[in-house]
Amino acid sequence: MTAISQNGLPMKRSLTSLISSLASSDNNCSREQHCLECGQTLTSRGARLQVCLECRAVWVAPSAFESLVEAPAGALEDLLGVEANSQNTHQATESGRGCPACGEVMQNYEYGGLWLDACQSGHGVWLDPGELELLRQSATVAR
């Protein structure tokens, strides 16, 4: 669940600080993982990236997050071009979703002006459909 400040607004957590503290963590889990958006089984693209082929959501290990955001567009072509749900993307989620790896409630973190879900145990960062493209756009503007 999102931490609430004294004035009742969600406290801003920085995903950058979580990622740096979990830099050596990988998305290792033996159980089959499912998409939080549509329920389909996630497809592995190496040890640190899993994708939903149905809705194009992404589950990425903290150690691979920044390289995913900065990867060449050609390498991510099948994950881009999806419209993001602005309700989930531009504000903190009221009730936390379970981590696809361990089932524990993930926390909301701000990164590049977007709100993302991440497992505090270091299993990964969840990107809803369309959020990868928005992150890449904000990274391009910041450069």
Image (cartoon, rainbow, N blue to C red):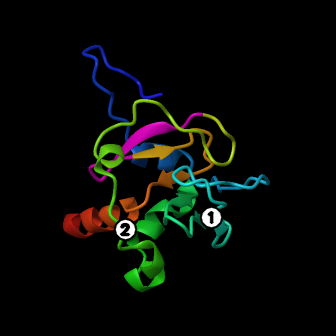
Q: Is mark 1 on a helix, strand or loop?
A: loop
Q: What residue type is labelled 1?
A: Arg
Label 2 crowding class (10 Å Cα cut-off): few <14, some 14-19, many 20+? Answer: some
Q: Which amino acid does label 2 sit on?
A: Val
Say left or right for 59 vs 82. right
Residue that sits furthest to the right in the current view? 30
Q: Name the residue under label 2.
A: 82
| Gap between marks 1 and 2 measured at Cα | 22 Å
Q: What element carries label 2?
A: loop
Q: Quadrant of residue 51?
A: bottom right
Q: Where is residue 73 in the image (x, y as percent from the top left)?
A: 38, 81
The mark total stands at 2
Residue at 28% from the left image edge and 46% from the top image edge: 90
State whether residue 5 is above or below residue 39.
above
Q: Quadrant of residue 138?
A: bottom left
Label 1 crowding class (10 Å Cα cut-off): few <14, some 14-19, many 20+? Answer: some
Q: What stretch is highlighted in magenta?
A: 105-115
Q: Position of residue 63 (x, y in %)?
A: 56, 59
State whether residue 10 is above or below residue 55.
above
State whether residue 122 is above or below residue 3.
below
Q: Mark 1 points at which residue?
A: 48
Residue that sits furthest to the top in the current view? 6
Instruction: State which mark lies toward you, 1 or 2.
Output: 2
Say left or right for 46 vs 133. right
